[in-house]
Image (spheres, grey):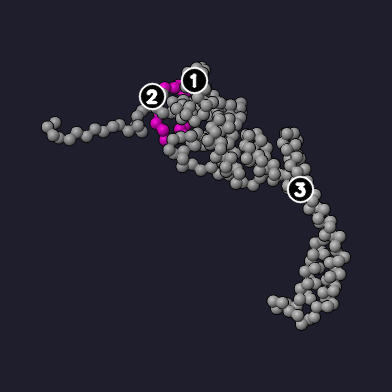
Amino acid sequence: LKFGSTVRLVRPSPWSRSCTHTCSRARPRRMSPLCDECEDVVVEFEQGESSGLNEMAVSSHVLRLASPVFRAMFASGMAEVESKRIRLRCDVGTPAEFGEFYGFLLPAIGRRRTLSESNVDSLLAFSDYFQVDALKDECEEVLMKLPASVQKLLQAHRYKLSAQYERCVQAVAIEPYRDLAPLQEEPSVFLDVATRMQQELAMLLPVRGRLQSVQSMKPKISMCKDLAWDYIKEEVFEDGRRVDEWVRDDLDELLEILR
């Protein structure tokens, strides 16, 4: 090199590095563009005797940062952690759903993902199970915009979504045609709905009393209609309409409502 010449240093790309993970099994499928050195742990999903086992390579660093459950697991010194293979009973969801959940945890690219009606239920289940509170809060925000139902009420109770639970209790209590049979398995939820129904009924009682007072005036309203028809002259118009017909039709409509 001559004095004053420019030397250009080229840093090897992390994408070109070879995998340092050694394992007798085939490399599990990757769920992210992280390099192999980053994906240092294999998660195994136990799906039952008939469906076998599914595997996925993940980053222990991502899992530790996002979830106190994984953080405690990696700090425990369990044999599974030492072997870099963690077996999960996927009662909470499928391997594909866990893959989507893991995608939300990834730095940078996780921000591009969108919560929607199609994935919010599974993401809520995993975020609750692994105590990822930030993602769980986002799931509740999405659920608050969806129609309330008995199933959504039970879901809110199971995952302790206080705002969504209150909204669903109110919606179920004021809808008389909802099937409440699923609430038999959750007596406390059924009691909350029944209590809210009583509160709504108590608010309606004064209205009922006023309605009865109005209904008692039906004979007078009918008499006023007849008098208006008999004594208002046909040539009296208002906004291009005969007033006697206008009064008659409107009072007939009111009497129909009071039946």
Dot 1: within a 10 Å radius of its alpha carbon, few (fewer than 14), some, or many (20 or more) residues? few
Type of amino acid under label 2: Thr
Q: Which residue is mark 1?
A: 75
Residue 172 visible to the viewer? yes
Check residue 31 for magenta coloring: yes
Check residue 113 for magenta coloring: no
21 to 163, vertically: above or below: above
Disc nearest the viewer among 3 and 2: 3
Please state the horizontal and vertical placement of residue 67, each as a whole percent of the image.
51, 29
Which secondary structure lies at badge 2? loop
Which quadrant holds the N terminus?
top left
| Relative to 25, 244 lies left or right | right
Q: Residue furthest right?
A: 219
Type of amino acid under label 1: Ala
Mark 2 and mark 1 lie on one chain; the one further toward the N terminus is 2
Please state the horizontal and vertical placement of residue 114, each as a whole percent of the image.
51, 43
| Relative to 119, 150 lies left or right | right
Q: Which residue is mark 3?
A: 203
Residues in magenta, as a range: 22-36
Residue 180 visible to the viewer? no
What whole-number distance in Å separates the C-alpha atoms at marks 1 and 3? 55 Å
Residue drawn at (17%, 35%) of the image: 6
Type of amino acid under label 3: Met
Please state the horizontal and vertical placement of residue 107, each as a whole percent of the image.
44, 35
Residue drawn at (76%, 73%) of the image: 246
Q: Residue furthest bottom?
A: 235
